[in-house]
Amino acid sequence: MASDNMKMRAQLKGAVTEVKVLMSHPMETGRRKDDGDRLIPAHFVQLLTATLNGEPVLEAQWGTGISKNPYLTFRLYGAKVGDIIAVTWHDNLGETATQQIIVS
């Protein structure tokens, strides 16, 4: 999938940076059926990581319980205006996407 499938915002508020991420992903469980009564294959994000200037700050293992087009918000300390936050996800079909944003 293309790297433009995420929308991000990283805003410094005092000592805390609030990061918001909206991802475009089908997040199929493998248990839902299509109109022809056939199972839709599982397709979901398994691993999500976030880094601050290349250093890991978040790792999440996800499964089929996460909704379509997941929205994630997290807060971190120690970031400054101009720092780079990157979010990467890997799914069960081997697809991956990465998006970066500069803290404002």
Image: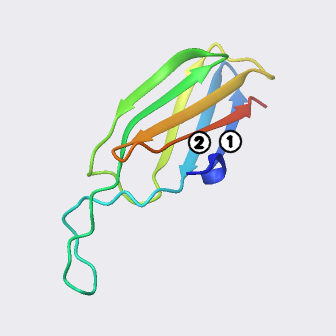
The residue at 62%/19% (across/down) is 52
The crowding category of the residue bearing disc 2, from other C-alpha atoms within 10 Å (few below 14, some 14 to 19, many at least 20), is some
Residue type indicated by callout 1: Arg
Q: Which of 41 and 25 is in front in this view?
A: 41
Quadrant assignment, res 98: top right
User: Residue 43, relative to residue 32: is it above or below?
Assistant: above
Describe residue 65's horizontal placement relative to residue 4 as left or right.
Answer: left
Query: In what element is the residue under mark 2?
Result: strand
Residue 31 place in picture, x, y as percent: 18, 65
Give the labeled residue for mark 2. Answer: 20
The crowding category of the residue bearing disc 1, from other C-alpha atoms within 10 Å (few below 14, some 14 to 19, many at least 20), is some
The residue at 51%/33% (across/down) is 74
Q: Do the residues labelled 1 and 2 touch (CB within 8 Å)?
A: yes
Residue type indicated by callout 2: Lys
Q: Earlier along the polypeptide chain: callout 1 or callout 2?
A: 1
Q: Nearer the viewer, residue 73 or 16?
A: 73
Residue 33 place in picture, x, y as percent: 22, 75
Residue 100 place in picture, x, y as percent: 68, 34
Quadrant the C terminus occupies: top right
User: Residue 40, relative to residue 25: is it above or below?
Assistant: below
Give the labeled residue for mark 1. Answer: 9
Describe residue 2's horizontal placement relative to residue 91 as left or right.
Answer: right
The residue at 66%/50% (across/down) is 4
Q: Nearer the viewer, residue 36 or 84?
A: 36
The residue at 57%/22% (across/down) is 51
Q: How far apart are marks 1 and 2 (CA)?
A: 5 Å
User: Residue 69, relative to residue 36: is it above or below?
Assistant: above
Q: Which numbered tag is attached to residue 19?
A: none
